[in-house]
Image (cartoon, rainbow, N blue to C red):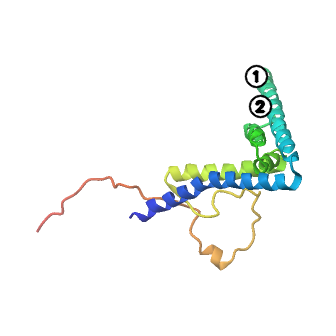
Amino acid sequence: MTQPAAQPARAGRRWRLIPPLFLLAEVVVVIGLFQFIGWWTVVVLLGLSALGVVVISTNTRRSWRDIQTMRRTGEAPERTAGDTAFVVLAGVLLIFPGILSSVLGLLLLVPLTRTWLRRLVGVAASRTLLRTMGVRVHHGAGGSPFGDVVQGETSPRAQAQPQAYEQVPPAALEGKIVDKPTD
């Protein structure tokens, strides 16, 4: 019975390792770049941070204009809240002094990357919501972040997989106890 509780604990430990490993990788990359181009590394880092400030300020102004347009016309703006959040995250990553974080920030500025990431976050959020509602989600359920699924033939192995959604039994049973009559 302790096995299900151990799995989330292991997953939590893995997630806690990501920030220190990322910071270590940032330091290693900056040191490597410094050895390669010298003091120009400082100029590159300052330039990327300035770009992050410009991205955040431009996006803030654009979002404010979208909100004002929406209030005036009653129509939703073309830019979505997800795009705004990803562009602000890109600006924050660019401001953070590091090459790897700046590369991630620059990737978030590409519209195709934001579209793919928005789908991926949507799938992850829907799976998390379903799990909290007591629905077990198996691998491959919840849609594909890469687009529509093309229907075709399936292999016998794929047909043997469990259903995508399975109701998790409740932790406690409700009902009344009925004594069996004795003869």
Name the residue at 84% across, 47% down.
41
Toward the bottom, the furthest residue is: 156
Q: Is 166 rendered above or below residue 60?
A: below
Picture residue at 49% right of the left edge, 62% below the top: 7
Amino acid tagged 2 = Ala
Q: In this view, does 123 lie to the left or right of 110?
A: left
Between 92 and 110, the one nearer to me in the picture: 92
Dot 2 surroundings within 10 Å: few (below 14), some, or many (20 or more)?
Answer: few
**Rendering coords of residue 125 (x, y %):** 62, 49
Considering only vertical position in the picture, is 89 above or below 74? below
Q: In which quarter of the image is the N terminus?
A: bottom left
User: Looking at the picture, which amino acid does disc 1 mark?
Assistant: Arg
| For marks 1 and 2 on the same chain, the one whose residue lies earlier in the sequence | 1
Report which residue position mark 1 lands on.
Answer: 71
Residue 87, horizontal then vertical, whole percent: 78, 40
Q: Quadrant of residue 51?
A: top right
Q: Which quadrant: the C terminus?
A: bottom left
Name which residue lies at 80% across and 33% down.
53
| Disc 1 residue crowd, few under 14, some 14–19, many 20+, Cα 10 Å | few
C-alpha gap between disc 1 and disc 2: 9 Å
Q: In the depicted view, which residue is nearer to us: 54 or 174?
A: 54
Indicate left or right for 128 with 37 as reference: left
Residue 90 location in percent, x, y?
A: 77, 42
Return the mark for residue 76: 2
Residue 114 drawn above or below residue 150 = above
Residue 171 is situated, as x and y percent measured from the top left of the image, at 38, 55
How many numbered callouts? 2
Mark 2: secondary structure: loop
Q: Is mark 1 on a helix, strand or loop?
A: helix
Residue furthest left in the image: 183
Q: Observer-nearest residue: 136 or 101?
A: 101
